Image (cartoon, rainbow, N blue to C red):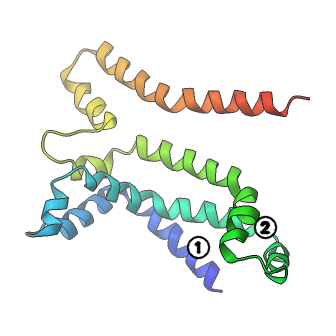
Amino acid sequence: MVGATADVLLIVLFAIPGTIVGVALIGLWNRPGITGAIYATNGMFLLVYLARFMPLGALAVAASLRRIPQSHEEAAAVSGVSWWRTMTRIILPQVRIGLAAVWVIVFTLAFGELAASVLVTPPGESTLPIRIYTQIANAPSSQVAALSLLQVTVIFVPLAVAGCGLALRRQP
């Protein structure tokens, strides 16, 4: 029951639009003191990406962990294996592909995030999606196309290399 409730809560959190997340973070961090000092830095991007995509990452990691039979942990406990060793030698090797998939999904979504990023961008800073968005109206279309191609390349090339590496590794 607790797991299902947590899943629903994480889905609801992920469904919150980026503009709402951005406005909420502005209201929370744009204050005098230490929070104001953080608000004026690139650390806000990290907070935005965590707020936007951590629920999705948590759901995907939980799905990977649910695939592991409880008996694996129980066998380790009966054998006297420490919790740390159980995690590093038994659990993590079984979920490494799932963790890699989560990283790829969250990185791809965060790299393209525009709505919340535009709202919390410190003065004089921008991300690639913000740069592309602002260039659409103010620059030649060739420059916008070049930046868009750069964004696609940053996502596609590492995925293609990883896919080729996995394909070569599986060949007999």
- Horizontal side, residue 75 vs residue 9: left or right: right
Tell me where residue 151 sits by quadrant.
top left
Amino acid of disc 2: Ile
Q: Secondary structure at mark 1?
A: helix
Q: Which residue is mark 2?
A: 68
- In the displayed structure, 80 sits above or below 85; it is below
Q: Would residue 37 appear left or right of 3 to someone viewing this image?
A: left
Q: Position of residue 129 (x, y in %)?
A: 33, 36
Residue 94, by quadrant, is bottom right
Judged from this view, the residue extending furthest toward the left is 32
Direction from residue 112 to residue 118 in the image, left or right? left
Q: Nearer the viewer, residue 4 or 172?
A: 172
Residue 58 in the image, given as x and y percentages of width and height:
55, 65
The disc placed on residue 56 is none
Q: Is residue 69 above or below residue 123?
A: below
Picture quarter with the N terminus: bottom right
In the image, is residue 100 above or below residue 29?
above
Q: CA distance from mark 2 to mark 1?
A: 18 Å
Residue at 79% of width from left, 81% of height from top? 80
Local crowd size for mark 2, using a 10 Å CA cut-off: few (<14), some (14–19), many (≥20): some
Judged left or right of residue 95, residue 152 is left
Element under label 2? loop
Task: Residue 43: give x, y in percent of width and height.
Answer: 27, 54
Q: Do residues under tags 2 and 1 come within 8 Å of each other at their CB atoms? A: no
Q: Name the residue located 77 percent from the left edge and 65 percent from the top edge.
A: 67
The answer to whether residue 84 is above or below residue 165 is below
Q: Amino acid at mark 1?
A: Asp
| Quarter of the figure with the C terminus | top right
| Residue at which label 1 appears | 7
Judging depth in this view, the residue of 144 and 93 nearest the camera is 93
